Amino acid sequence: MPRPILATIDTEALSHNLRIVAGRLARDTVDSPRIWAVIKARGYGHGLSAALQGFSQADGLAMLDLDEAVHCRESGWSGPILLLEGFFETSDLEVLNRYRIATTLHCNEQMAMLEACRIPHALDAYVKLDSGMHRLGFLPDEFRVTFRRAQALRSAGILNSVGKMTHFARADDDPAFTREQLARFQAATQELPGPVSVCNSAATLTPGFAASVSDCHAGQTQWVRPGICLYGASPFAGQSADSFGLHPAMTLSSQLISAHVLPTGEAIGYGQTFRADHAMRVGIVACGYADGYPRHAVTGTPVTVAGVRTQLLGRVSMDMLAVDLGPVPQAHVGSPVVLWGVGGPSVDEVALSCGTIGYELLTAITPRVPRSVLQASPSGNPL
Ligand SMILES: *Cc1c(COP(=O)(O)O)cnc(C)c1O
């Protein structure tokens, strides 16, 4: 028997979360924006094929990696695809062209490559404004010039539609700075034609942001770019995914491979960071940092054993971790353990206990963890 660890991916949860986001947008805006489902990092660790199934009703797919984009096309996705960092070298352009992949344009080097290229069909593109994230994009004072350069490439038959985009630095925790970024975006892009794309998960879930983008760009198609919320995790530190009606799409589960007593005064695991002040029953779970469970998780991190919530004890090892069986006296070797997901703590709760975010945990599951993809049935219930 292989080690009992398993990542279960529920494609119906992905579809459900997409519907939740679409429903919120429909209530928040007059003209519902279109949705790019962000599937970078192999669908935030859920696997590309699961993401393709779960997001079959999305308006478009956004990602980073050209090979992943080609894989989506070859798997039968015929809708729009956007590369969020665009292309990296001239030879990529021919692939974008062949597979009808839209590109972000964020730097002058990309503009120069486009101006020098020869491609048979025009590409769709978004020119990116750096409105305050200061990672990628053109600063407000260079934006209009660049946008005009991109429009000139339409006349040259190299570009087809040319849109505008930007990215928020603090949509999860600083609405004032987010409004400032939005104001900079609106000032830089006002009256420029073409589709517009601004909102990530946090901005998409915050009423008002998508609506104000539509107000300022009336008559232009708005696309939002939610990622994390579509996987059933929250972009906000203080607000659970559950409170939005989102369902976890990944459940990381395992089993107890040992259950025994830790005698009074003895410590468990590497570094002896947890010492028992009374004789206590502990369990050893087949899950460690080589599976992608965070080594920085501390004693007290929530974990569910046989349906009962308990806590991690001591340091996480490469292949194992220890849990407190005090609240679960009936637990035994083979008892089911949920590290996060359905029937266990949320990935966000686990992330909080190790000073990180759900994004990092979901994308860190390692290849040695087997995956089981639950397919949605035609009735909408998982089989
Ligand atoms: C990752 C990413 C998103 C999605 O962000 P979430 O916080 O997961 O919603 C949107 N836009 C860009 C440019 C990104 O890189």
Image (cartoon, rainbow, N blue to C red):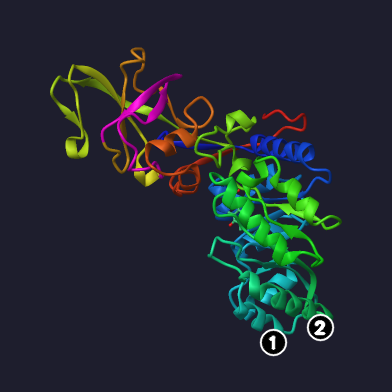
Residue at point 39%, 41% (across, down): 293
Vertical comparison of 11 with 72: above or below: above
Residue 102, horizontal then vertical, whole percent: 72, 66
Instruction: Identify the image quadrant of residue 264.
Output: top left
Per the rendering, the mark at residue 116 is 1
Residue 35, horizontal then vertical, whole percent: 73, 49
Residue at point 63%, 77% (across, down): 110
Instruction: Identify the image quadrant of residue 101.
Output: bottom right
Tell me the magenta residue range.
292-314
Task: Tell me the crowding category of disc 1: few under 14, some 14 to 19, or many 20 or more residues within 10 angstroms, Cα based.
Answer: few
User: Where's the C terminus, which quadrant?
Assistant: top right
- Residue identified by numbered label 2: 156
Amino acid on which disc 2 is placed:
Ala
Asked if residue 13 shows in the view, the reply is yes
Residue 364, horizontal then vertical, whole percent: 45, 48
Vertical comparison of 336 with 76: above or below: above
Disc 1 residue lies near ligand 1 with CB under 8 A: no
94 or 223, which lies in front?
Answer: 223
Assess whether residue 296 is covered by the magenta stretch. yes
Amino acid on which disc 1 is placed:
Ala
Under circle 2, the secondary element is: loop
From the viewer's perspective, is 291 left or right of 240?
A: left
Q: Distance between the residues labelled 2 and 1?
A: 11 Å
From the viewer's perspective, is 251 left or right of 52?
A: left
Vertical comparison of 87 with 115: above or below: above
Q: Do the residues labelled 2 and 1 touch (CB within 8 Å)?
A: no
